[in-house]
Image: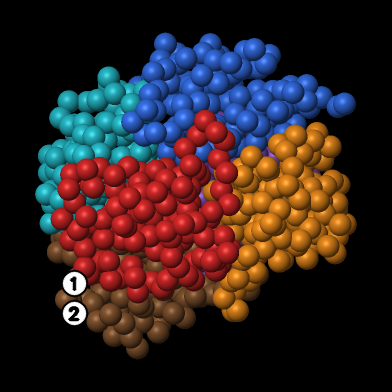
Chain colours: A brown, B blue, C purple, D cyan, E orange, F red
Amino acid sequence: MTTKKFMFVNRKAPYGSIYALESLEVVLITAAFDQDVSLAFVDDGVYQLKKGCQTKAIETKNFSPTYRALDGYDIEKLYVEKESLEARGLTEDDLLVDVTVLDSQSMGALMEEQDVVLSF
Amino acid sequence: MTTKKFMFVNRKAPYGSIYALESLEVVLITAAFDQDVSLAFVDDGVYQLKKGCQTKAIETKNFSPTYRALDGYDIEKLYVEKESLEARGLTEDDLLVDVTVLDSQSMGALMEEQDVVLSF
Amino acid sequence: MLHIINKSPLDRPTLDSLLRMGQSGAVLLIEDAVLAATQGHAAAEKLRALMTKMQVFALAPDLEARGVSDRLIDGVTGVDYGGFVDLVAEHPNCQSWL
Amino acid sequence: MLHIINKSPLDRPTLDSLLRMGQSGAVLLIEDAVLAATQGHAAAEKLRALMTKMQVFALAPDLEARGVSDRLIDGVTGVDYGGFVDLVAEHPNCQSWL
Amino acid sequence: MKFGILVNEGPYQHQASDSAYLFCRAALARGHEIHRVFFYHDGVNNATKLTEPPQDDRNIVSRWSKLAEEHDIDLVVCVAAALRRGIKDENLAPNFRISGLGQLVETGIQADRLVTFGD
Amino acid sequence: MKFGILVNEGPYQHQASDSAYLFCRAALARGHEIHRVFFYHDGVNNATKLTEPPQDDRNIVSRWSKLAEEHDIDLVVCVAAALRRGIKDENLAPNFRISGLGQLVETGIQADRLVTFGD
C-alpha cells in the first residue's frame, strides 16, 4: 500500500470538547495502516499534553495515558509549537511525553511537506 | 402572569451557525408571553442585522426579513454595541432595522438590569 | 450579576467582551475558560484588569481536568460545583457569555 | 499548500495562527472567515500582512450570505464553489485550520 | 431556590451537557429545586435513546434520564430543533418529553435563575 | 481528480455540512470524482433518517442521500462516533453506511486530496 505523510493538527484544549480524544483514535488507526504519522500541537492543543490532568471531578474519561502509549505504536513524531507553549506559560517540562519543540516557521514548513493534514 | 425582563445577547455571525436563526424563534415566543424583550447585538452578532444578505448561493433560508418583522410583534428594543460595529467597519446605515447604538459601558449596564439573559 | 465564561481566552473573545461591557458582580470561569487563570498565561493581565471591578472564581474540577490546579493566579478563588450553585444563587441574575 | 479558514478572525485565532505558521501558497476564506476580507474590518491589516506571502481568496457565496460582497478589500479574489474546487486541485495539499 | 437550565449543545462533542448535569446534581445536593432542563439547538441530541457510548465512558443520555427519575425533573426537548435533527418519540430516551419553546420561556419566568450551558 | 471529504459537524448547527455538500456538487460538475465522504464526530448526525426540517428549509440529510444515489458516492459514518451519538442502522438514512475509521484513513491514502469541513 502507498505510504503517505499524515499530519494531525491539534489546536483545541482537551475535555472542553471531544476533538482531542477522537483525534487520537484516528492517529492510532492511521499508524495501523503503516502510514507516516506526525502530530502537531499548536494553540490550545498544547494543553492536550499537559501533565497531571485529573478528570475524576468532571466524571469524564481521562485519555492522557493514551499519549504515553503512542510510543508503543511507533508514533514518535510529536511536534509542539514553541510560541503556543510560551503564550500559555508552559515549558517542555510540563508535558507528559517527549516532543520536538519547533518555532512557528519550522512548524509551518513541516505542514507544507505533508500529503494529508487533518485538523481536529 | 409575571412580567420579567428578558435579554437575548447575540454574539455570532449569521449563516455560519444556526444560533441567530434559533435565537429569533425564542425571541418571538417570549414576546408572545408578554414579557419585556430586549435584543443585544455584540461582537460578530452585529452582522445578523447587516443589510443585503443573499443566501441563494449557499442554498440556505434567508432569515433577514424576520428582523424587519420584529416591529410587528412589538419587539422594539434592539441594542447594538458601538465598539462592535466600529471594529467591523460598520455603521448604523449598514443595518436593516432601526436600533439604539450603545457604548460598551451602557450595554453592560443594561445587561445588569435584566432578569433573564439568554446568549446564543 | 454573575458572568459565566466557558471558553479559552486564546480561542474566543468572550473575556475581552466581558472586559469591555462587564460592570460589577463576579465572574466564574468554567470548562476551557479556567486556562485564563493560570500563571504565565498571556491572558493573566486581562484577568487582573477584570479583578479591579469584579471578583473572579474558577471551577476547580475543570482546573484539575486540565492539570493546572497548582498554577492558579493570586486573587482567583477555586470553587467546586456546589460553589458554582452558590454563586448563581447569591447573585440576582446571571449571564453565560456564549 | 492551500490553507482554508472558516471562522471569523474576531471570534477565533486561526488567522493569527496562519500568520505565524503559514509559509506560502494560498489562503481561501470560507463561511464566517470571509468577514476578515471586508473594508474597515479590524482584521484587514492582518490580511494585508498575509498577502505579502500568500494569495488570498474569499468564497463569494459566503460573502453574499453575509451581505458584504461589495466591501471586499483590494487584493482578495472572490471565487465560487467551482473556484474553491480548482484551488484545492491546483495546490499539492491543503489544510483546514479548524 | 428554583433553577431553570438551558442546554444548547449535544452530548460528547462539547462539555456543555456534562457541566449542566453536574450543576444540576450539585444544586439538588444543596437542597435547591430544578424546575426544568430545556434542550435547544444541538442540545436535543442529548435525548436519543439509541446512544451507546464505550463501556469506560459515561452515558450522558441515561444519566439525564436517571436524574429526572430520581428527582422528578422535567426534561424538555424543543420540538422544532428536534425535528430538524431527527429526535422524535420513536428514539426519545425515558423521562424526556418533546414540547415547544414556550416551555423555555415559562422556565425563564417561573424559575428564580435560568442558567445556560452551551458552546 | 479524486477527492475525499471529511465532515466533522452535524447538520444545521454549523455550516460545515452545507459547505461540504456544495463543494462535492461543484467538484462533480467540474468532472472530478468524490471518492468518499466520511462523517466523524458530530458529523455522524448528518445520517439520521428521522430528520424533518421546516418546509421552507433545505433537507440536509436527504440531499446527501440523493447526491450519493445520483453519483454513486460512498457515504461512510464512523461507527464509534455514531454509537456515542445514537446513530444506528435502524435510523440510518438511505445510501449511508456505518463503518470504521479505517475508511477515513483509506480515503486519505487513495484520494488525491482530502478536504475537511468542521467547526
Residue at mark 2: A1
Mark 2 and mark 1 in contact? Answer it, CB < 8 Å: no
Q: CA distance from mark 2 to mark 1?
A: 9 Å
Secondary structure type for disc 2: loop
Can the viewer see residue F57 in this picture? yes
Instruction: Check disc 2: other Cα within 10 Å, few if <14, some if 14-19, many if 20+.
Output: few
Q: Is residue A46 left or right of residue C85?
A: left
Three-letter amino acid code of the residue under disc 1 = Lys
Secondary structure type for disc 1: loop
Residue at mark 1: A4
Q: Nearer the viewer, residue E65 or F66?
A: F66
Direction front: furthest residue: F70
**Count of marks placed on residues:** 2
Direction bottom: furthest residue: A72
Q: Is residue E16 above or below residue A47?
A: above
Q: On the rendered image, what quadrant is the N terminus of chain F found in? A: bottom left
